[in-house]
């Protein structure tokens, strides 16, 4: 299905086809490949108007990366991004996303034309909980609900800052809200709260049941504290923990 504008997408979603979909962004080169016209340069999973967000990002000068570079090159040549939807479903379609990414291949490793930064890891579950790339670490921890022993923030009290988080629906936003609403909460408690939530609509959780594994949650908490582009939470006592 070709998507020219948000109204066309809304009409398709109104038919009950979604709410989730796998989309392909394409070069306007009239080449027929992978179920549509135009050489694919990005594959993703969408909900709502996600398919249009990459072009919005490309319009911001400070945004960098292979994907936005490809979009800007299309615009510079006087063209428009071709958008197609590969499939719709009521549940997350990351299995189909993985199939397409692996079939088309990545530009960065010379296997294809996609600007995606990574290949989605293949499915793997423990006790019915999707763990994918975390399977070996989660098994070593003792099970999908077991917090890994290398989680340095497990017993550390956390508070907001030094940066703030605007979105409260993203994974980072949820973590920020938990710490903001309960200053002094430990990393272990944040992970436990996260495991009580339903993450069905969160693509990066890779879950259809809504449940997430402890390693995934712990890695996110660690990243929100130490990743240079985040740092939206921090130890109450910085001397308690090192990176």
Image (tube, grey):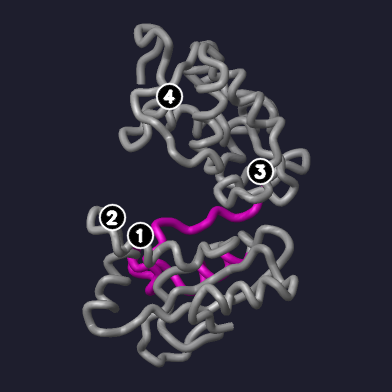
Range covered by the magenta-colored residues: 96-124
Q: Within the magenta stretch, is there residue 105? A: yes
Q: Is residue 148 above or below residue 209?
A: above
Callout 1 touching callout 2 (CB < 8 Å): yes
Q: Earlier in the sequence, mark 4 or mark 1?
A: 1
Can you tell which quarter of the image residue 164 is in? top left
Callout 4 touching callout 1 (CB < 8 Å): no
Q: Within the magenta stretch, is there residue 74? A: no
Can you tell which quarter of the image residue 136 is in? top right
Q: Residues within 10 Å of mark 4 (few under 14, many from 20)?
A: many
Q: Earlier in the sequence, mark 2 or mark 4?
A: 2
Q: Residues within 10 Å of mark 3 (few under 14, many from 20)?
A: some
SS of the residue at dot 1?
Answer: helix
User: From mark 4 to mark 3, how far is it between C-alphas?
Assistant: 21 Å
Q: Residues within 10 Å of mark 1 (few under 14, many from 20)?
A: some
Q: Position of residue 104 (x, y in %)?
A: 47, 74
Name which residue lies at 40% across and 69% down.
Answer: 114
Q: Is residue 87 above or below residue 225?
A: below
Q: Earlier in the sequence, mark 3 or mark 2?
A: 2
Callout 4 touching callout 3 (CB < 8 Å): no
Name which residue lies at 65% across and 35% down.
Answer: 213
* Res. 63 mark: 2
Closest to the observer, 188 or 106: 188
User: From mark 4 to mark 1, how far is it between C-alphas?
Assistant: 25 Å
Q: Earlier in the sequence, mark 3 or mark 1?
A: 1
SS of the residue at dot 2?
Answer: loop
User: From mark 2 to mark 4, how far is it between C-alphas?
Assistant: 24 Å
- Name the residue that disc number 4 marks: 233
* Res. 57 mark: 1
The image quadrant where one finds the C terminus is top left
Name which residue lies at 53% across and 43% down.
Answer: 170
């Amino acid at each position: 299905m070709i998507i020219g504008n948000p109204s066309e997408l809304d009409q398709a979603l109104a038919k009950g086809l979604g709410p989730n979909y796998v989309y392909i962004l394409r070069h306007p080169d009239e080449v027929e490949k992978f179920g549509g016209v135009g050489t694919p340069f990005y594959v993703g999973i969408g909900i709502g108007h996600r398919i249009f967000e990459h072009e919005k990002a490309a319009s911001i000068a400070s945004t960098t990366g292979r994907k936005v570079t490809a979009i800007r090159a299309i615009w510079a040549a006087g063209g428009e991004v071709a958008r197609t939807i590969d499939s719709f479903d009521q549940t997350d379609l990351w299995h189909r996303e993985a199939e397409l990414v692996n079939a088309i291949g990545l530009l960065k490793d010379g296997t294809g034309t996609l600007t995606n930064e990574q290949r989605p890891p293949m499915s793997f579950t423990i006790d019915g909980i999707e763990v994918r790339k975390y399977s070996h670490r989660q098994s070593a921890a003792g099970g999908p609900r077991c917090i890994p022993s290398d989680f340095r923030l497990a017993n550390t009290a956390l508070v907001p800052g030094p940066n703030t988080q605007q979105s409260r629906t993203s994974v980072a936003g949820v973590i920020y809200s938990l710490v903001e609403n309960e200053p002094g909460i430990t990393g272990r408690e944040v992970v436990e709260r996260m495991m009580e939530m339903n993450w069905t609509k969160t693509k990066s959780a890779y879950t259809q049941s809504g449940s997430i594994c402890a390693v995934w949650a712990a890695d996110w908490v660690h990243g929100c504290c130490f990743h240079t582009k985040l740092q939206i939470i921090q130890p109450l006592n910085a001397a308690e923990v090192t990176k």
